[in-house]
Amino acid sequence: MFIKTRVTDMAFILLLFVTLKVAAVQLEAALAVDDESSSSSGGGGSSSSSIGRAWQRAKDYVSGVINGARKMQRAYNDMKEANWKKSDKYFHARGNADAATHGTGGRHAAKFISDAREAYGFFKGDSAADRAADQRANEHGRNGGDPNKYRPIGLPKKYKK
């Protein structure tokens, strides 16, 4: 239990670090585009409004990552609570689908968390076939597919998407 908790904590810290780095890169790119457009237009553009838009995009991205990670955690908690045979693919697809509703940041969080989980599965001894099936369910949900495709018969309605 201790190792599993530590791995989860480390993955979340790494996710936050990557998120902040990506947000900073997006902000720098937006500022560079603004510098190019204002210099080509004779400098008459308002760089403060462009900075404001870039800052808002960065905030939206970070918010998406955080909310997407929360959705992934909720799906994981529901899967553990349900303790239902053959339901893991459904919860993988549902968590990714829910996270993806939070924009690019949510989709990135879902992909990062899913990939980290499957990497952990490799070291834990999960079969390659099971890891590949999990990734198919993850991608299905993240790309807008209906998670109910993977819903096992009899799973309580409480867990319906």
Image (tube, rainbow, N blue to C red):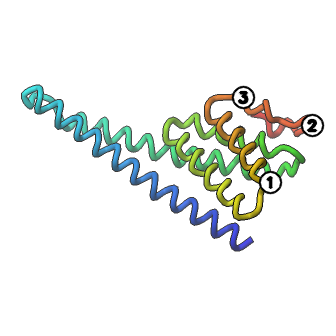
Q: Residue 21, how many percent across, how many down?
A: 39, 53
* Left or right of residue 45, residue 22 in this image: right
Judged from the image, the secondary structure of the residue bearing numbered disc 3 is loop
Check the image and report above or below for 44 versus 21.
Answer: above
The C terminus lies in quadrant: top right
Q: Which mark is residue 80?
A: 1
Q: CA distance from mark 3 to mark 2?
A: 18 Å
Amino acid marked by disc 3: Asp
The residue wearing badge 3 is 146
The answer to whether residue 115 is left or right of residue 64 is right
User: In the orientation shown, which residue stands out farthest toward the front?
Assistant: 128
Look at the picture and state if 128 lies above or below 143: below
Amino acid tagged 2: Gly
Instruction: State the quadrant of the N terminus.
Output: bottom right
Q: Residue 156 vs residue 34: left or right?
A: right
Residue occupying image coordinates x 20% and y 38%: 48
Q: Give me the disc on residue 154.
A: 2
Of residue 50 and residue 28, the one placed in the foreground of this image is 28
Q: Position of residue 141 (x, y in %)?
A: 67, 35
Label 2: how many Cα within 10 Å (few below 14, some 14–19, many 20+): few
Tell me what residue is drawn at x 31 percent, y 35 percent: 53
